[in-house]
Image (cartoon, rainbow, N blue to C red):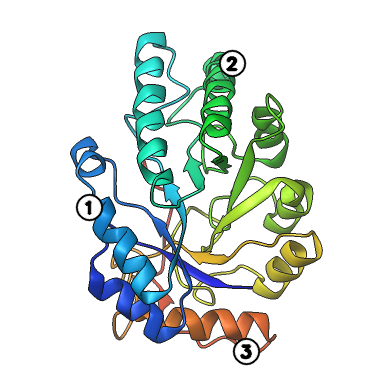
Amino acid sequence: MRIGRFSGGVPNEALFAAYQKSGIEVMELSVGNKQEIHDNLPFADIQKWAEAYGIELWSYHLPFGWYNIATLDSAKRAKVIDLYAEMIKKAREIGVRRFVTHPSAEPYTPEERADRIAACKESLVKLAEIGRQNDAIIAVEDLPRTCLGNCSAELLDLISVDDDLGICCDTNHLLGEDLIEFISKVVHRVVTTHISDYDFIDERHWLPGEGKVDWQAVYKTLTEGGYKGPWLYELGFGTPTKTLQRPRDLTCEDYVRNAREIFEGRELTVIGTPLPGLGMNVW
């Protein structure tokens, strides 16, 4: 399985060089939630660097937060879809084919959930068609807490509106369902991953080995289920100081060593230690 990592902001040439040197082979463009950043991405440079350093531009994380495809405001929902369509078109021109979308924002009450699901499905129908028009794949990400898509049944229900929709399996978002059971139920629709560890209390985006996930089971369930995409890390180099202690920042080499330890069934090199008394984020 190839090793990938998100860009963690607008990438520069140095990041591509570091990926090549360490053995990271694919990148997800994940540049944040500000519209002006997406509007002004240096696509030509990104394509040039990707080709020069042999890094595949695997996926593009569509912005979230304000960009809520489950909003009950139909005019805003249409605006979000239009913005996504433009981002998809631009990124396809440099070879990106997979586009990760959050199915909602949060927090949501149980009483409004059905309406939010209906709005999300309406949006996903439109996104799937935009994907077909651009020879692109829309990957819907599982999310934590009260977000839509926080369990296998709901996520599969959301993507049932179109057979061309896929799933982005985020390994640190499952709070109400066992992660391995979740993967086993959705793996037939998984087209990409977001790899990071957590404590089962809330999402943490730690390096595998720093949390509680059974990584051999995750790897086995994905591969035996037929997943062919990359092992794509979604966590930063810096230490999340509100949740973790590390003696140093991470490097690209840490990601590659970590992945190879998982692939080869070896004991993981643990760098960080969770802080005591962690609870769930307040939204």
Is 2 left or right of 153, judged from the image as shown?
Answer: left
Which kind of residue does numbered mark 3 sit on? Glu
Task: Tell me the residue that label 2 is attached to.
Answer: 118
> Residue 200 occupies which quadrant of the picture?
bottom right
Q: What is the CA distance from the residue labelled 2 to the residue labelled 3? A: 44 Å
Which kind of residue does numbered mark 1 sit on? Pro
Q: Earlier in the sequence, mark 1 or mark 2?
A: 1
Which kind of residue does numbered mark 2 sit on? Ala
Residue at the image position 43 percent from the left and 74 percent from the top:
54
Question: Mark 2 packing: few (<14 Cα in 10 Å), some, or many (20+)?
Answer: some
Q: Secondary structure at mark 2?
A: helix
Q: Is residue 50 visible?
A: yes
Task: Tell me the residue that label 1 is attached to.
Answer: 42
Mark 1 or 3, which is nearer the eye?
Answer: 1
Residue at the image position 34 percent from the left and 73 percent from the top:
52
Residue at the image position 30 percent from the left and 68 percent from the top:
49
Residue at the image position 56 percent from the left and 79 percent from the top:
259
Mark 1 or 2, which is nearer the eye?
Answer: 1
Q: What is the CA distance from the residue labelled 1 to the residue labelled 2? A: 36 Å
Q: Earlier in the sequence, mark 1 or mark 3?
A: 1
User: Closest to the observer: 57 or 249?
Assistant: 57
Is 202 left or right of 219, judged from the image as shown?
Answer: left
Mark 2 or 3, which is nearer the eye?
Answer: 2
Quadrant that contains the N terminus? bottom right
Q: Secondary structure at mark 3?
A: loop
Is 33 left or right of 103, judged from the image as shown?
Answer: left
Percent of width and height locating residue 68: 40, 27
Task: Tell me the residue that label 3 is attached to.
Answer: 267
User: Closest to the observer: 110 or 238?
Assistant: 238
Percent of width and height locating residue 86: 35, 31
Q: How many circles with numbers are drawn on the protein?
A: 3
Which residue of the protein is positioned furthest toward the right in this rendering?
A: 224
